Amino acid sequence: MTYVVTDACIKCKYTDCVEVCPVDCFYEGENMLVIHPDECIDCGVCEPECPAEAIIPDTEGEADKWLDLNTKYSLAWPNITQKLDPMPDADKFAEEKDKLKHFSEKPGEGS
């Protein structure tokens, strides 16, 4: 089992999850985070830390479609290992559903 980040993270990019991750398996895009599934140790400490509830275990039905996205972009984006400020208007976007239309393939800055 691994954990994946869903579209609920898009345009929020809270990094509370990064701060608690013991293996630094988060990667930063321009407007969301992803988890490298081969680096995740399935501890689950990140899931309850996400204010947008964007992290789910890969055993949930909808996780399959997010596993590919997390895998692909964790190989392309820089690693992030420390908490940063969320995106502007993150609280507003946290309530939005179906945010894939806002997804950016551009990398973040990493840390």
Image (cartoon, helix red, strand yellow):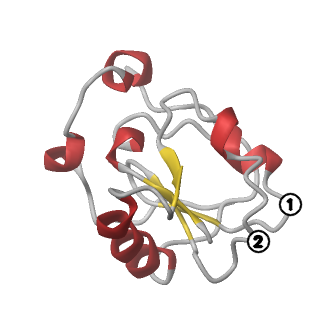
Q: From the image, tell me which residue sits under label 2.
A: 41
Q: From the image, tell me which residue sits under label 1.
A: 22
Q: Quadrant of the C terminus?
A: bottom right
Q: In the rendered structure, which amino acid carries the disc numbered 1?
A: Pro
Seen in the image, is 46 located left or right of residue 21?
left
Query: First in sequence: mark 1 or mark 2?
Result: 1
The image shows residue 81, relative to residue 93, as above or below, that is: below
Q: Residue at x 58, y 76 (%)?
A: 37
In which quarter of the view is residue 83 placed? Answer: top right
> Are the residues tagged 1 and 2 within 8 Å (C-beta)?
yes
Seen in the image, is 66 located left or right of residue 82?
left
| SS under mark 1 | loop
Q: How many marks?
A: 2
Q: Which one is in front, 6 or 85?
A: 6
Q: Horizontal and vertical percent for residue 80?
A: 66, 60
Q: Gap in Å between the C-alphas at discs 1 and 2?
A: 9 Å
| SS under mark 2 | loop
Seen in the image, is 6 located left or right of residue 45?
left
Q: In the rendered structure, which amino acid carries the disc numbered 2?
A: Ile
Q: Nearer the viewer, mark 1 or mark 2?
A: 2
